[in-house]
Image (spheres, helix red, strand yellow):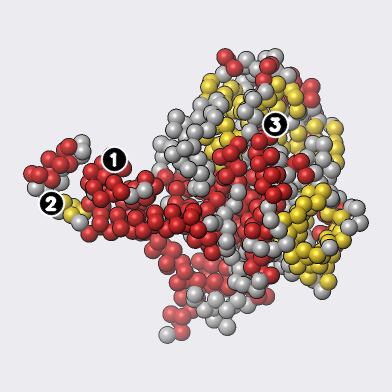
Amino acid sequence: MEYDIIVIGGGHAGIEASLASAKMGKKTLLLTMLAEQIGAASCNPAIGGLGKGHLTKELDALGGHMALATDAAGIQFRVLNESKGHAVRGTRAQIDMDRYKIFMRNLILSAENLYVSQEIADKITTKNETVEGVITHLGNRYSAKKVIITTGTFLRGLIHVGEFKQQAGRTGEFASYSLSDCLREIGLKMGRLKTGTCPRIDAKSIDFSKMQIQGGDEHPLPMSFRTDKESFNPFQLPCFITYTNEATHEMIRGNFHRAPLFTGQIEGVGPRYCPSIEDKINRFADKGRHHIFVEPQTKEASEYYLNGLSTSLPPDVQLNFLHTIHGLEEAKIVRYGYAIEYDYAEPTEIKHTLETKKIKGLYCAGQINGTTGYEEAAAQGLMAGINAVLSIDEKEPFVLRRDEAYIGVMIDDLVTKGTKEPYRMFTSRAEYRLLLREDNADIRLMEYGYKFGLIDERTYSKVYRKKEQMREGLEFLEKNVLTPSKENIAFLASLEEEGINDKTTYQKIAARKSFTVEKLEKLLPSLLNFDTEAKEQILILAKYKNYIQKQEEQIASMRKMLEVKIPADIDFTKVSGLGNEAAEKLKRFNPPTLFAASEISGITPSAIDALHVYIVMMQKGKR
């Protein structure tokens, strides 16, 4: 059986990869262990958050489906960091895990050009270091021009609950050992990572009266740019907050000797930013309590997820320490928390397109690349799907720069730096985060989605109109001025704004912290006919003009620097600031320009800076 593209794994990465491939016209096969688990949220019942919300909205702007599924299955929507600047805000939504999965499965099964088979991929077949296809556990052979691996935690997955160990990719589901062995045989360098999940509690056994209530936003905004804001009125459920205490910590400390994390039973490296509760108590011994977010898993709210209590302690210890926590004194565990170890492929062995360097036509996306999180996986899946199609069509690859998208930051981090722990996206990872806001992801990226056929004409035309309105509004603000006349000072006073002493551009008036969209409409009555989102963007850009201009200048300078040619007679070992490994790689690959050097795995931005300074000094010395 022949296909253009085969995607292995029906998780968040596999969904986006297969849908993109099929929508771009390629005959696509999705191989999954269990068809009913397509789109399963293995860990927390939420999409988005700080950094992750940026990825979700960028994915949406490119034509992905995670945000649409979130809006369809969401049960609470909140904008995090709303009191802070636009660059660090993040939209987060609690989801009904069952409805989310059903939405995604139906989307996959009804998509044209997309075929699904419930089988386990055992082997990748290759010839002359080029992918040929896949052999499954049933002995079926499928040939393909491209293969995308999105296996999540299933490669040699090993679950830990206390002393108990089970070979599984997720509770109750088989681990994949043959495929992991195959990837080693074809030359991929593999490593071992660890992640974990929290206990799930029967709602009937929780005393919510002892907890703080945490509701959603009063006027919730959808995750997707394609969801109509005016008609968006989701069913909102509250979450709750409680805390661990000294009794909890004492119980856990007294059972460190039974914790797989400390006994040597677990070998893989876990996520530093999201440690298990036993790791928190060990590392932060001086901290008297830790947050626990009690989150509903479905609209019916019959089961709750204890966010912040990831653990692999034995079942009896889990139950005992839960009973020390306010509101959980009578808690009944439906599903115990566990840790899971799994294999991943070293991401420095993939290109920016997510194609492996050793096997042509073989792509990796998601946790196999060392990341963690639904959003990171989905974004990689979409990029792998798009690039696999473009490669078949012999078109230029699609690589987002660090100044274009958080997706570009994430992939560049993985490919050039690698990772020794599960990688998670944070706003702090993006150097140009003021330009890469959640609110402008559609403006930045939807043109690409439209170009690839993943965004329809009607949706793109709305964004195009918004861009035009923004250009017109900003141009007016820049070119027009207010004089300190009595009429203008009275006008500003009517807006509850301070007067002016000199000629002042409308842009500087709009840049005031106190200025709102409502005031902007009075300042520029022509804006009344503009789309609401265009007006919001005009105000944001007016307020951050100087900062944005500075970042744009930095980007222009960086691009100019990357065009610098590397002298043929350079001795990389003499470059101050370059480590031995970087110098050896540069000598081996002998890149012609700084841009080519930046594409080499393991060559970091700081190494490029050091190399640039050295080249400039070389050129000055030769004059």
For disc 2, the neighbor class at 10 Å (few under 14, some 14 to 19, many from 20) is some
Q: Where is residue 130? Give x, y as percent.
A: 78, 70
Instruction: Identify the element where label 3 is drawn.
Output: loop
Residue type highlighted by circle 2: Thr
Q: Residue at x 85, y 38 (%)?
A: 166
Which part of the image, by quadrant, shows the C terminus? Answer: bottom left
For disc 1, the neighbor class at 10 Å (few under 14, some 14 to 19, many from 20) is few
Disc number for residue 518: 1
Q: Where is residue 421? Give x, y as percent.
A: 68, 48
User: Residue 360, relative to residue 513: is it above or below?
Assistant: below
Instruction: Identify the element where label 1 is drawn.
Output: helix
Q: Residue at x 70, y 27 (%)?
A: 200
Disc 1 to disc 3, C-alpha distance: 45 Å
Q: Where is residue 606? Give x, y as percent.
A: 53, 62
Q: Nearer the viewer, mark 1 or mark 3?
A: 1
Residue hosting label 2: 483
